[in-house]
Amino acid sequence: MTIKFCSQCGSGKIESALPPGDDRAREICADCGYIHYVNPKVVVGSIPVWGEQILLCKRAIEPRYGKWTLPAGFMEEGETLAEGAKRETLEEAGARISIEQLYASYSLPEISQVYVLFLARLDDLNYLAGSESLEVKLFHEHEIPWDELAFVAISEALKRYFADRVKGSYTPHFSDLRRAKIR
Ligand SMILES: [Zn+2]
């Protein structure tokens, strides 16, 4: 991401340069010398399970408006991963969950995102579409709208989940999702 203004002094003179001892160029304020480090963002979310069914949200926002996704979003400052997953699930699906285990982590280096998804149990059926969702619905495996999923990380996690369910064991996993797969 390109920085236009210095968040420290408001200057518009931002230059790309290699700070002493660093191994890559950074955006540096020419007026106050502040170095603007830009690091990946964490997208945290859950796979909310109710018996044989999974809770998905239909997106009411861009990108991927109208596509289905697991409740997930950018982690906020001051919260833990598990708190972030619960908050996103409550915000997007109006659902309360109990975290069961860490399940999946995906690195998307080209868009500077890291996904962390938890397996979770829905506490009850009082879910309700939040402002970022058009609809929230429970799906059996055969009902999953595979061609209408919003993000490749979501389809990866769901494919893995249903394969693990057949085996009866849910092993945490990680993988790298590169541009070719991101669409
Ligand atoms: Zn500055």
Image (cartoon, helix red, strand yellow):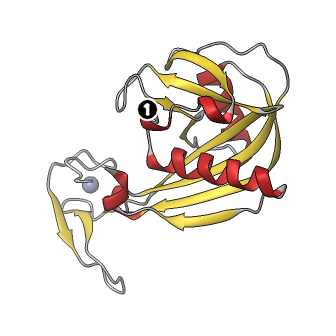
Q: Residue at x 59, y 14 (%)?
A: 129
Q: Which kind of residue does numbered mark 1 sit on?
A: Glu
In terms of depth relative to the viewer, which is nearer, 33 or 41? 41
- Residue at the far bottom in the pictured view: 21
The answer to whether residue 88 of the structure is visible from this angle is: no
- What x and y, as percent, mark residue 178? 37, 63
The structure residue drawn at horizontal position 59% and vertical position 35%, both measured from the top left corner, is: 70
SS class, disc 1: helix
Residue 157 in the image: state x and y as whole percent: 60, 50
Q: Can you say whether 105 is above or below 153 in the image?
A: below
From the image, tell me which residue sits under label 1: 148
Viewer can see residue 60: yes
Asked if residue 57 lies left or right of residue 123, the reply is left
- In this rendering, the answer to whether 23 lies above or below 54 is below
Q: Quadrant of ligand 1?
A: bottom left
- Is 37 left, or right, of 167 in this rendering? left
Residue 93 image point, x, y percent: 64, 22
* Towards the viewer: 12 or 106: 106
Q: Position of residue 131 (x, y in %)?
A: 52, 14
Who's the residue at 85% across and 25% down the image?
A: 123
